[in-house]
Image (cartoon, grey):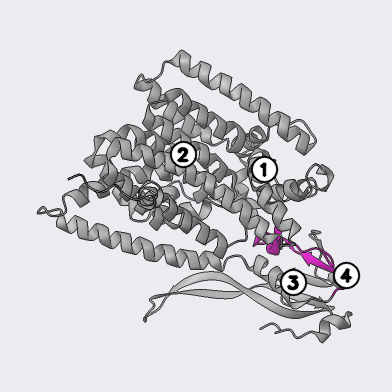
C-alpha cells in the first residue's frame, strides 16, 4: 500500500520551513531593534529620501552630510522601489515613518534570505540533507549574520551577491561565479576584489575556467557595472564619480581608514570570527579535516580573511562575506559527528557539540540584549515625541552622538516638529540659540533643563550569582528643554539622574 501523500501545508513546510525559521529570527531582530547606527546612515537616509522626496534631489540628506567617502545609491534604489507600495500605503494612513524604516529593512532581509536559500539548496544537493539541516541550525544560532541581514550596510548589499557567488560556485557555473563577485566589488564593496582574487585564482589553478575566458568575463561585466554605477550615482551625487573607486583610493592608497581605529593582525581569527561564528568556528576547521570536498571552497575564503588582516582598520562586518561558506564547512563536521554519535569515541564529540550549540544560543541571547540597548538616540527621540503632544512649532537639535546611535530621518515626525543636526556648536552657544529641545550626550547645559536621560549598553559584567552575566547600562543621551519656554516646564518630566 502506497504511503499517503503529504498535505499541501506539509509540502510547503518541508520546502520552506528552514527559510521561515531564519526569516522569523531576522524579522524578530528587526522589529525589536528597529533603529540604525552611523555605519548604516548613508543607505538609510538614501532610502528615506528616495521614498519621501522622490526626484527632488536637492532635498536629499547626502548633499548636506556627504560623509567621508561617497557610496552608491543602487542598493538603496532597488530596496526602495520594492518597498514603495507598502510605504505609500503607510503614508496614506499617516503611519509614523519609523515603520517605513522597518519595511525597507524587512525587504533587504528578504533579499539576503533568498540568496541564503539558494545556497542552502546547493548545500543539500552537494552534501546531503543532514549538512543542510546543520547549516541552517548553525546560522540560526549565530547572532551577527541574521542581525546584520536587515541592516542597510554596503557589506550586506554585497553579501547578497557573495551568496550568489557561492551558489554558482557549488553549482559549477564558474562564469556566473566571477560575475556575481564583480558586481559586488564594482558597485557595493571594493574590498570584494580580494575575494574575487582568491576564488578566481582557485578556479584558474583547478582549470575550471581558462585565463582568457576569465579575463573576458570579468572585463565585460566590470565595464557594464562601472557604466551603470557611474551613470546612476553621478546623477544623484551631482558630479561624475565612481563611488567604490573613491572608497578604494581612500582606504587602500591613502590608508585613511586607520584613522577610525586599528586592531592587531590576528584580530579576525582571535576575536571577530569566534564571536560571530561561535560553535561553528572550531567545527569549520574540523569539517575541512573530515571532508576533503569542502577544502577547495574554504581555502580561498580563508585566504580572503588572511589578506584582509593586512589592513590595520578592522571590523567584523568587513569579513561577513566569509561566514556563509565557513558555516558550510562547519555543517559537514556537525553532520559527520551526528551520523557517528553512537560509535565509541564519537559520543564525547557529540556531547561537546550539543553543548556548543546551547552555548551559542545563550551567547546570541546576551548579544541581542546588548544590541537592544545600544541605540539610545533612537529611543530618546521616540520618548520626546511621545512626551510632548502640544501643537506648537518645536525645533529639536540632535548632536553627532545621538545621530550616530539610532536617529535617522525615518525617526522624524511631521508638523509641528522640526530638526537640526548643525555641527560644531559649543555648549556655551546653545543658550544663545532658539532650540526647543536638545538631544545630546551632555548632562548639564546652561539655559536648558535636563528633562530625562536614556540609558545605553556600557559593558557586560560577570557576577557570582544567577544569572552569571549581567549587562551594565549607563545614561548615554540626555534630553534638554529650553527654560525660556513655559510650555515645556509645565509638562511632567522624569528628570535626569
Find the distance from the CA under tag 4 to the CA under tag 3.
13 Å
Among numbered discs 4 and 3, the one appearing first in the sequence: 3
Among numbered discs 1 and 2, the one appearing first in the sequence: 1
Among numbered discs 4 and 1, the one appearing first in the sequence: 1
Find the distance from the CA under tag 3 to the CA under tag 2.
40 Å
Among numbered discs 3 and 2, the one appearing first in the sequence: 2
Tell me where residue 339 appears, x and y as whole percent. 19, 49
Q: Disc 1 designates what residue? A: 81
Which residue occupies the foreground of this view, 243 or 162?
Answer: 162
Q: Is residue 413 shown above or below 72?
A: below
Which residues are the magenta region?
391-417
Task: Report crowding for label 3: few under 14, some 14 to 19, many 20 or more residues within 10 A (C-alpha).
Answer: some
Q: Disc 4 designates what residue? A: 393
Q: Residue at x 48, y 37 (%)?
A: 162
Q: Secondary structure at mark 1?
A: helix
Tell me where residue 493 appears, x and y as whole percent. 73, 84
Tell me where residue 484 appears, x and y as whole percent. 89, 80
**Are dots 3 and 2 in contact, CB under 8 Å?**
no
**Are dots 2 and 4 in contact, CB under 8 Å?**
no
Q: Residue at x 60, y 49 (%)?
A: 152
Q: Secondary structure at mark 4?
A: loop
Which residue occupies the foreground of this view, 171 or 258?
Answer: 171
Does the segment drawn in magenta span residue 416?
A: yes
In the image, which is nearer the foreground, mark 4 or mark 1?
A: 1
Could one spot residue 327 in this view of the protein?
A: yes
Q: Disc 2 designates what residue? A: 163
Q: Disc 3 designates what residue? A: 385
Find the distance from the CA under tag 1 to the CA under tag 2.
22 Å
Left or right: 59 as drawn, with respect to 34: right
Amino acid at each position: 500500500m502506497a504511503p499517503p501523500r503529504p498535505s499541501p501545508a506539509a509540502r510547503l513546510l518541508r520546502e520552506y520551513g528552514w527559510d521561515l525559521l531564519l526569516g522569523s529570527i531576522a524579522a524578530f531582530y528587526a522589529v525589536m531593534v528597529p533603529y540604525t547606527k552611523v555605519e548604516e546612515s548613508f543607505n538609510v537616509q538614501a532610502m528615506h529620501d528616495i521614498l519621501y522626496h522622490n526626484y527632488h534631489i536637492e532635498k536629499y540628506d547626502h548633499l548636506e552630510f556627504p560623509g567621508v567617502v561617497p557610496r552608491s545609491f543602487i542598493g538603496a534604489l532597488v530596496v526602495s522601489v520594492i518597498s514603495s507600495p507598502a510605504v505609500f500605503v503607510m503614508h496614506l494612513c499617516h503611519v509614523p515613518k519609523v515603520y517605513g524604516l522597518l519595511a525597507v529593512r524587512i525587504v533587504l532581509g528578504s533579499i539576503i534570505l533568498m540568496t541564503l536559500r539558494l545556497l542552502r539548496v546547493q548545500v543539500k544537493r552537494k552534501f546531503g540533507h543532514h549538512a543542510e539541516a546543520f547549516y541552517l541550525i548553525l546560522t540560526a544560532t549565530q547572532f551577527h549574520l541574521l542581525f546584520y541581514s536587515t541592516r542597510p550596510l554596503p557589506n550586506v548589499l554585497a553579501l547578497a551577491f557573495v551568496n550568489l557567488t557561492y551558489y554558482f560556485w557549488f553549482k559549477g557555473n564558474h562564469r556566473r561565479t566571477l560575475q556575481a563577485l564583480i558586481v559586488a566589488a564594482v558597485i557595493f564593496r571594493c574590498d570584494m576584489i580580494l575575494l574575487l582574487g582568491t576564488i578566481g585564482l582557485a578556479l584558474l589553478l583547478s582549470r575550471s575556467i581558462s585565463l582568457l575566458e576569465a579575463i573576458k568575463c570579468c572585463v565585460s561585466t566590470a565595464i557594464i557595472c562601472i557604466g551603470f554605477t557611474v551613470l546612476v550615482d553621478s546623477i544623484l551625487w551631482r558630479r561624475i564619480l565612481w563611488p567604490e573607486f573613491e572608497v578604494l583610493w581612500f582606504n587602500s592608497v591613502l590608508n585613511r581608514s586607520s584613522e577610525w581605529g586599528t586592531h592587531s593582525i590576528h584580530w579576525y581569527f582571535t576575536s571577530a570570527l569566534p564571536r560571530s561564528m561561535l560553535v561553528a568556528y572550531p567545527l569549520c576547521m574540523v569539517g575541512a579535516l573530515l571532508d576533503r570536498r569542502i577544502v577547495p571552497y574554504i581555502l580561498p575564503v580563508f585566504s580572503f580573511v588572511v589578506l584582509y588582516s593586512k589592513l590595520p582598520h578592522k571590523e567584523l562586518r568587513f569579513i561577513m562575506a566569509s561566514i556563509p561558506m565557513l558555516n558550510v564547512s562547519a555543517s559537514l563536521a556537525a553532520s559527520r559527528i551526528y551520523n557517528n554519535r553512537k560509535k565509541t569515541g564519537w559520543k564525547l564529540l557529540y556531547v561537546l557539540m550539543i553543548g556548543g550549540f546551547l552555548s551559542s544560543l545563550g551567547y546570541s541571547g546576551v548579544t541581542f540584549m546588548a544590541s537592544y540597548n545600544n541605540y539610545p538616540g533612537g529611543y530618546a527621540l521616540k520618548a520626546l515625541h511621545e512626551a510632548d503632544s502640544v501643537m506648537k512649532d518645536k525645533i529639536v537639535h540632535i548632536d553627532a552622538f545621538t545621530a550616530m546611535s539610532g536617529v535617522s530621518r525615518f525617526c522624524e515626525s511631521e508638523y509641528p516638529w522640526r530638526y537640526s543636526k548643525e555641527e560644531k556648536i559649543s555648549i556655551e552657544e546653545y543658550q544663545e540659540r532658539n532650540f526647543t529641545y536638545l538631544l545630546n550626550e551632555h548632562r548639564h547645559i546652561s539655559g536648558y533643563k535636563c528633562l530625562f536621560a536614556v540609558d545605553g549598553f556600557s559593558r557586560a559584567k560577570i557576577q557570582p550569582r544567577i544569572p552569571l552575566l549581567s549587562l551594565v547600562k549607563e545614561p548615554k543621551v540626555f534630553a534638554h528643554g529650553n527654560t525660556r519656554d513655559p510650555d515645556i516646564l509645565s509638562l511632567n518630566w522624569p528628570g535626569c539622574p
